Each structure stands twice: as C-alpha cells, then as structure tokens.
Image (cartoon, helix red, strand yellow):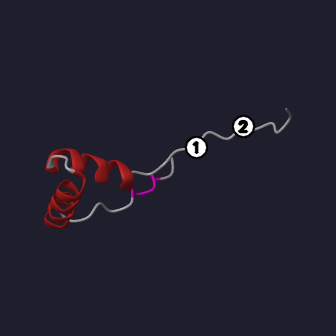
Amino acid sequence: MGKKAKQAIEVPLEGELEAEAAYYARKCGITRDEAAKIIREAHAPMLSIVRKDKTR
C-alpha cells in the first residue's frame, strides 16, 4: 500500500484567524475577508519544482 500523505501545517483556530485578520485589515485598509485569505495563503505549504538533472 502507499504511504500516507503528510499533514499540512495547522491553520490557526478560526477565532485566532478572525482576530489576526481584523488586525491586519485595519492596518492595511482592506476587508477582513481579504486579510483572512492572505493569511490562509501564507500558511499554505509551498511547493517547489526541482529539476532532476542539474545540467544547464
């Protein structure tokens, strides 16, 4: 059988996310929804593409 997928980094609890989004929304002059989206994207795991052959 295959291996289990790695678990993603935990996103802050909804209450913490809302408080953080409200803070950044006031500081940056954006809506709380936009700030929450940015925070979620920042916490998402980054994927990188690595070439197998290192010749250039």
Give the residues drawn in magenta, as a range. Answer: 4-8
Q: Residues within 10 Å of mark 2 (few under 14, many from 20)?
A: few
**Between 8 and 21, the one nearer to me in the picture:** 21
Query: What percent of the width, then of the height, locates residue 41?
Result: 35, 48
The magenta stretch spans residue 6: yes
Q: What residue appears at the point 62 percent right and 39 percent down from the top-left corner?
A: 49
Q: What residue appears at the point 21 percent right and 44 percent down from the top-left corner?
A: 34
Q: Amino acid at mark 2?
A: Arg
Q: Amino acid at mark 1?
A: Ser
| Kind of element beneath mark 2 | loop
Q: Which residue is mark 1?
A: 48
In the displayed orientation, state which residue is furthest to the right. Answer: 55
Answer yes or no: do the residues labelled 1 and 2 have beta carbons within 8 Å? no
Q: What residue appears at the point 80 percent right and 36 percent down from the top-left corner?
A: 53
The magenta stretch spans residue 5: yes
Q: Residues within 10 Å of mark 1 (few under 14, many from 20)?
A: few
Q: Which residue is mark 2?
A: 51
Using the image, determine if residue 16 lies above or below residue 50. Answer: below
* Quarter of the image with the C terminus in it: top right
Q: Is residue 19 left or right of residue 41?
A: left
Q: Is residue 47 left or right of residue 13?
A: right
